[in-house]
Image: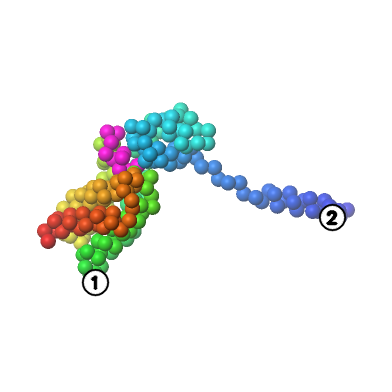
Amino acid sequence: MTNSPAKAKSSKKRKKKSAVQRPVKTRPDELLLAAVVRVVAKRGVEGASTRAIAAEAGGGITDTVIYRYFAGKDELLHQAFLRESNAFMAEVGRLFSVLWETNLSREHRLRFLWHTIWTWLTHHPAESAFMIRYYYSASFTPAAMADYHKIWQPLADRLSELLPGKDTEALVFMALETTAAANYPVCTGWREDGAAASEYGFRRLMGLVNEFLND
């Protein structure tokens, strides 16, 4: 016995409906990692209470949920910092090879790398403010420093190939400090982003490199 046209049409509708994909739900721990970045960027580490972080995360998350995924606020801060630092260092490392372009002057090589770094930082103001504020806070533990060192150490190792005999670990560390100092007023809204702010930061970096290489 054949199906009637009405039944066939109804069957097609049911099949079409079942083919619609439901949106993937973001995990609570990922919501919390993103939330702590935004809260610290706006309020600083001291103003980032577990209740404020949970409220920022949304999705019905309460501050007690934090302890299901993290040992506490300190671990949440630590893990968020590692995530954002890895993203930032990946961007730096992506174009790090420009420093080996011998057909360009040192200034041109550094300027190209600086522009890449500055663009990333100014397009991620909350992430930048979070990293700097956490790094310079009392909550930044020796364990967090050790993990941070592991993240940027590969850049220092690569740079030692270009500058044998130089303390490239110290150079990378000081370059990161210089970059943070130049970017902080911008990512926190104290100073407008623009050519002047970028040039100020670049000149500080250029001066550091020239002094380090005794030029």
The residue indicated by pointer 2 is: 5
Q: Residue at x 24, y 71 (%)?
A: 103
Estimate the x, y position of residue 54 in percent, counting from the top left.
46, 33
Whether residue 33 is visible to the viewer of this picture, yes or no, is no
How many residues crowd around disc 1 within 10 Å: few (fewer than 14), some, or many (20 or more)?
Answer: few
Checking the image for residue 190, the label placed there is none
Answer with the quarter of the image where residue 142 lies: top left
**Closer to the camera, 150 or 106?**
106
Answer with the quarter of the image where residue 116 lies: bottom left
Estimate the x, y position of residue 71 in percent, counting from the top left.
38, 31
Estimate the x, y position of residue 92 in percent, counting from the top left.
31, 55
Looking at the image, the residue that sits furthest to the top is: 64
Quadrant for the C terminus in the image: bottom left
Q: Residue at x 17, y 56 (%)?
A: 207
Q: Residue at x 46, y 28 (%)?
A: 64
The image shows residue 132, relative to residue 155, as above or below, that is above
Amino acid type, label 2: Pro
Q: Residue at x 48, y 30 (%)?
A: 62
Checking the image for residue 103, the label placed there is 1
Which SS class for mark 1?
A: loop
